[in-house]
Amino acid sequence: MSKEKHSGGRIIAIRIVIVLVFLLYTTRLFSMQILSGDIYHSRARNIARHTSVIQAQRGEIFDRNFSQPLVYNADSFAVGIIPAEVPRQEMSELKDRLAPILGLTRNQIDRRLPPSMYNLFNPIELAVNVPFPVIAALAEQSTSFPGVFWELKPMRVYPNIGSLSHIVGYVGSITREELTVLFNLGYRQGDIIGKAGIERQYDELLRGREGRETRTVDVRGRNVGADNVRIFPETGNDIVLTIDRNIQALAEAALGRRIGAIVVLKPNTGEVLAMVSSPWYDPNIFNQLDTGAEFQALINNPNRPLLNRAIQASYPPASSFKILMSTAILSENSFNPLQTVECRGEITFGDRVWRCHNRTGHGRLNLRGALAQSCNIYYWTVGTEHLGAENIINHSFAMGFGEVTHIDLPGEISGLIPTPQWKERRLHERWVGGDTMNMSIGQGFTLVTPLQMANMVAMVVNDGVIYTPHLLKEVRDSRTGAIEMRVDPTVLHRSNVSPAVFATVREDMRGVISEGTARYPVNIRTVEIAGKTGTGEAGFLDRWHSWLVTYGPYETDDPDERIVVSVLVEAANQWEWWAPYATAIIYQGVFGNMSYEDAIRALGFQNIAPIEGRRE
């Protein structure tokens, strides 16, 4: 009897437990389905919803006339894969099937998607600039390509860009290092960003704001919902440059395929009308994922096509520096400009003989004649015996040498104005009279960029004011064309030198063209100009750097029409003293409203400036 009671008690206890468990599950089920049903329904829908990024188009880049864009976008697709969504055993076969469709080799796909990435849920790009028929073929067989996706990805197009490549730059995929720096500014993995030039300098203005599309999909990624949400991307701002495409093309043709640089500047605003650096490169090559070989070829090229020689290379200014020397002599009243110095072709200083470029001598010359004939003996004598190194150095810094111009391009260098302190610190040597001799004619340690030389002339033209050189003219709304920002001139340097001194220097610079070293090659019919030639030593016996820095018109009632032209042709070229001829072509074309071909015919340069081989 006691056993039966004990057995009955156990059965009752089990029944109670079963009832309690049943009630617990019933309560929980009621809570999930009835009380919290909306929450879990929403979670279920979110699991089945896919969010994708819609790339924003970058703003276009225009020249100062805001007509045809220098840089624009073309519709293109990118194909990628989310590795973790592909079964490991199917990955190899998937790669084999994808390669011919995307026009890639298996090795290329393996490099972009190595086994170490198979567990990643992050999307990996496999191909860019994919044509629409390929996308259509993938869409038709989407079930055969698990994890594979495609998206609209605008391609940057640089049409017939030529020497503008150093100005506009190029774009590329953001790197891990760049993302580390830019993450807090809203950049993300896979973004296309500016890598050089204007594309990099004004990336935040150009890049726009990406959009989002959220869709309800099934396990195969097919759209199964009607409640898709799309946030449309916003195109970046358009940028209008100060560059005049006609002057740019003219300067490019005038320089030809020679290694060198040309800057055309508006001195009264600092606007850069043209900037040519040769050789240049084609930024369109960076539109592919695999650009390593092309980039390495550019880096290994001994002519350094990636280098913008207008702002990233420095040279001895040679006799063009005598503009500064004349300004310093007049300003410091260190030597009467009417007093003469006799040039016999050479002078002894220290333990060596210093020779003028005219080995037979210029005879007796005053300041005006010395600048016109570029007499080294005059500037050596006055520079060392009357002006002195300290004054030369001070006037050099006052004219902006030895520091960057703050142009709105990345990578600008400062050049070098040597000082006694610099020489002791860098070379562990004292400053000697020979250093002053060298500096007096723009040689020795002195190094400048073509843009800095343009600024020097601008200071003379502007009676002592240099405006910050700039390439950005306006920022415009890409939809309406409305101007959102306009760049105004800003003063970079203001000199204490009297305007009367600069007026005298301008007169003397005119003498260089009318009766001095440049009178024959710069025989321009359309405009009077003033300037100074220079022949810089570069360690060769048979060739030198060729300089000519100028402005024009020499006299005008409208300062806005004036331009400064700085031309540097490297000694790497066969010697032909080309800077004066290139300068003549530019002024003839600009003020005669002529093409390159018409300008060389008007100047009679047909035999020395052939048309063949230039970019049309």
Image: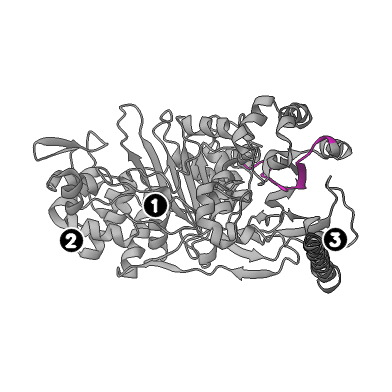
Amino acid of disc 1: Met
How far apart are the two marked residues, 1 and 2, measured between alpha carbons? Answer: 24 Å
Q: Which residue is mark 1?
A: 453
The disc label shown at residue 258, or none: none
Residue 597, percent across and down? 63, 38
User: Which mark sits nearer the N-terminus, 3 or 1?
Assistant: 3
- In this view, the residue farthest toward the left is 351
Q: Residue placed at 43% from the left, 28% from the top?
A: 574
Q: Quadrant of residue 567?
A: top left
Q: Is residue 532 visible?
A: yes
How far apart are the two marked residues, 3 and 2, measured between alpha carbons? Answer: 81 Å
Boundaries of the magenta span: 144-161
Q: Quadrant of residue 316?
A: top left
Q: Residue placed at 63% from the left, 34% from the top?
A: 112
Mark 2: few/some/many CA within 10 Å (<14, 14-19, 20+):
some
The disc label shown at residue 228, or none: 3
Amino acid of disc 2: Ser
